[in-house]
Amino acid sequence: MAVVTGAGRNIGRAEAMLLAEQGAKVVVNDLGGGPYGTESGDASLAETVAQEIRDAGGEAIGQCSSVATREGGEAAVQAAIDAFGRIDILVNNAGIVRPARIDRMTDQDWNLCMDVSLTSSFFTCRAAAAHMIAQRSGVIVNTGSPSGFGHWGMANYSAAKEGLLGFTRTIARDLGEFGIRANLIRPVSHLTGTHTPEIDETIAESARLGIPLLWNKPMAQPRMTALPAHVAALVVWLCTDAAAHVSGRDFYIQGDEVALIPEPEAIRTSIHPGGWTLDAFDEQANRDYLFGSIQNRFVRTPDPV
């Protein structure tokens, strides 16, 4: 028994379809809104996907509450309890973008993005956790983003998605003793449901200024375009017994590449007996160990002469 939020399109839809194909009974949740969070919703979207699942021989219901609210998040989980008697899998896929440089970002840009891309997962996870603890089992998969590493023109979305990583690691620790696992995925795809013309503009502006769009630790070069089905396969696998040992982890997926992202670790360490002072930091900088090799990647590249 599974709940998939943001399942009306693209990756969320593919996740719901594959879960059903593998035998799960699915609550397809989607408000039916657009990528900005302010468009009028299409309440039929969730039911359309649920009908596709039923037509293929699976079991599913459509549910269109807004998981960005406490009531909506609880309603999505309760729909699984009412229809199927339990919840074994929760996939949080709902998210929106409100691209803007920080000085141009409005309160609404920030708050809407946080509500849908971060807080919604809190509401659904809290509701699901109560049932999963009673069952002594359950799997949660939250959808992060490479934007969490830092993305030009998307401070709100980056903060929400990287906040989701800390949230996921913490609930994995909180709930592990009850047989519940939680992981995060970072899909790279133009078919996430949050790709917009404004994002294309931030990409172009970043290139014009010579500023890295994302963090500067590239993965391998994928040999194919990312598709929702590829992301869905990872998500569904994480929900199987084959992944029983995997929890609190962070996975990047693009095309034919999957990468396990490590937890942060110190790459250089320096100790100053008696504690640090301004003079001590100046001395350390002159030694070219801790600070000397660092370069500012975010300054504008000079225009060619």
Image (cartoon, rainbow, N blue to C red):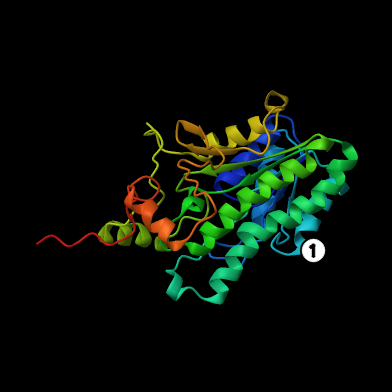
Question: At x 60% / y 47%, what residue is drawn?
Answer: 143
Question: At x 74% / y 30%, what residue is drawn?
Answer: 23
Foreground of the two, 196 or 175: 175
Q: Position of residue 139 (x, y in %)?
A: 74, 38
Q: Position of residue 280 (x, y in %)?
A: 43, 56
Q: Is residue 279 left or right of residue 32?
A: left
Q: Which residue is mark 1?
A: 71
Q: Quadrant of the N terminus?
A: top right
Residue type at tag 1:
Glu
Q: Residues within 10 Å of mark 1 (few under 14, many from 20)?
A: few
Foreground of the two, 255 or 296: 296
Q: Is residue 256 left or right of residue 114?
A: left
Question: At x 31% / y 57%, what residue is drawn?
Answer: 211
Q: Position of residue 218 (x, y in %)?
A: 39, 40
Residue 58, by quadrant, is: top right
Residue 209, by quadrant, is: bottom left
Q: Quadrant of the C terminus?
A: bottom left
* Residue 214 seen in this snapshot: yes
